[in-house]
Amino acid sequence: MDSDASLALLTDLYQLTMAYGYWKLGRAEREAIFHLFFRKPPFNGGYAIAAGLGPVLEYLEQLRFDKSDLAYLATLTGNDNELLFEKGFLDYLSELKLSLDLDAMPEGSVAFAQQPLVRVRGPILQCQILETALLNIVNFQTLIATKAARICGAAQGDPVVEFGLRRAQGVDGGLTASRAAYIGGCAATSNVLAGKKYGIPVKGTHAHSWVMSFDDELTAFDRYGQAMPNNCVFLVDTYDTLEGVRNAVEVGRRLRQQGHEMVGVRLDSGDLAYLSIEARKLLDAGGFPQARIVASNDLDEQIIESLKGQGAKIDVWGVGTKLVTAYDQPALGGVYKLGAMKDDQGEWQPKLKLSEQVAKTTIPGVLQVRRFHVGDVLAGDMIYDEMRGIDSREVIVDVKDANRRKRMPTGAVGEDLLVPVMRGGELVGPFADGVETIEVARTRAQRELARLHPSIRRLLNPHQYPVGIDVGLHERRDQLIREMRWDFAEQA
């Protein structure tokens, strides 16, 4: 985040009109709890990788309405052309300092549908004005981190380099995609600014234009070797791919005589399976068995999985457009919903949104997620209400199908996934000294993915990991739904 730019207005207008309403009616300080979650894992997959918490915390630490923000808000008018906001409300915003509590899944955590990734507790006005920015940050980075994890899984341990900056959705989209892709498992990025900003390793070769700027390909490779003898990955498909590999071998021999070693070649078009196999033969026969073959050209997890199945001899995968734009699903669809609010007596009251769609009926309460495991084997995740605790039956009920239930195994150990991040507007716990590094988040993602059964990680028709509502919370939720619907029926 740019520390010199105010991001207080990075929001939808209706967040501010609701905030004004809370202030106008004397409800601004009423304590509330909101949960940020998604209803369905992206890409028809079996999981997601939580990301974006670091930028969220940077945003929250900097959040202030500066003079230019307030001056702009003072110009807005309603449908009657009268001012939208009173001066008293703008004065209130000018002095606003966040006093929120925040609990969240650390970045790199494996997450599933309906689980809160972030829980926000505090004055309802403050909770409300954060909604849009939190969703903007967490939705996109979680989406890209998940896409990267899927691609890296398909690569089966081969390095994946994120090549997407030129196709990314704007400057911020390019930077945050590089960050999230690294958390999701990518080994490096071509994005130099992301390398500087986030400490991500940067990698790159040369383009077709370098080859085309010389009279012939052999000369182009030779001159590049002279200029960059310690970074020679030759792009070989400008004219004829296999002839390009032969030229790379010739220049590689010249480099070796000078005390340098060719890193490898890059394939960017054509039949990558066939060409990589033939290129491998040429490199090995030429004395370069350690030279790497890098492949690019609109790759994604399905194509990589197919190429692997065809026996392609590719060592490094450069993935751009389809990673940084989340090409096959460009939005996560995360939401931010009110779960509980204090009444006039200061008692917590659960809040529930009804819907004709079962998946859109929310879960009321102060929600936490407990992940159960036996040894290193994951048994399932339970969404429960911290105000009431876990029912002694230790049974989870599927959110969409109440007939699907699972009892946690005897001896299973549980750990809560939402950890304290902020108290009273100040960072606490492991975050007290600042935001985690993305290396920590990346390591966490690798560790947690390794604990998932391969059937949950597979690309096509993944097995559903057991996630459900604590049976006691499920019963209270059902009762609340019946009471609300009965009330509506009586009023009809």
Image (cartoon, grey):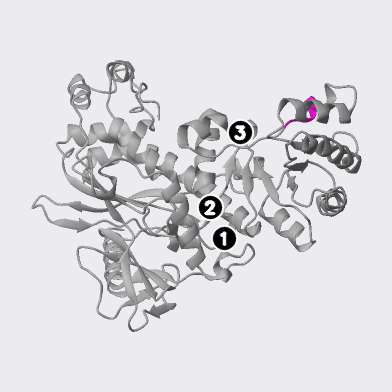
Front-lying residue, 87 or 305: 305
Q: Earlier in the sequence, mark 3 or mark 2?
A: 2
Q: Which mark is residue 146?
A: 2
Name which residue lies at 89% across and 41% down: 246
List the residue tagged with mark 1: 45
Horizontal side of 175 relative to 23 (left or right) equals: right
Which residues are drawn in magenta?
Answer: 206-210
The percent position of residue 439, horizontal first and vertical second, equals 45, 47
Q: Amino acid at mark 2?
A: Thr
Query: Earlier along the polypeptide chain: callout 2 or callout 1?
Result: 1
Q: Amino acid at mark 3?
A: Leu
Quote the CA–CA distance across marks 2 and 1: 9 Å
Q: What residue appears at the point 37 percent right and 30 percent down from the top-left corner?
A: 13
Q: Are marks 3 and 1 in contact (CB under 8 Å)?
A: no
154 within the magenta span: no
- Residue 434 found in image quarter: top left
Q: Which residue is mark 3?
A: 165
> Closest to the observer: 22 or 250?
250
Q: Which of the two labelled residues, at mark 3 and mark 1, occupies the earlier sequence position?
A: 1
**Residue 1, image x, y percentages:** 40, 30
Q: Quadrant of the C terminus?
A: bottom left
Label 1: element kind: loop
Residue 239, labelled with which disc?
Answer: none
* Secondary structure type for disc 2: helix
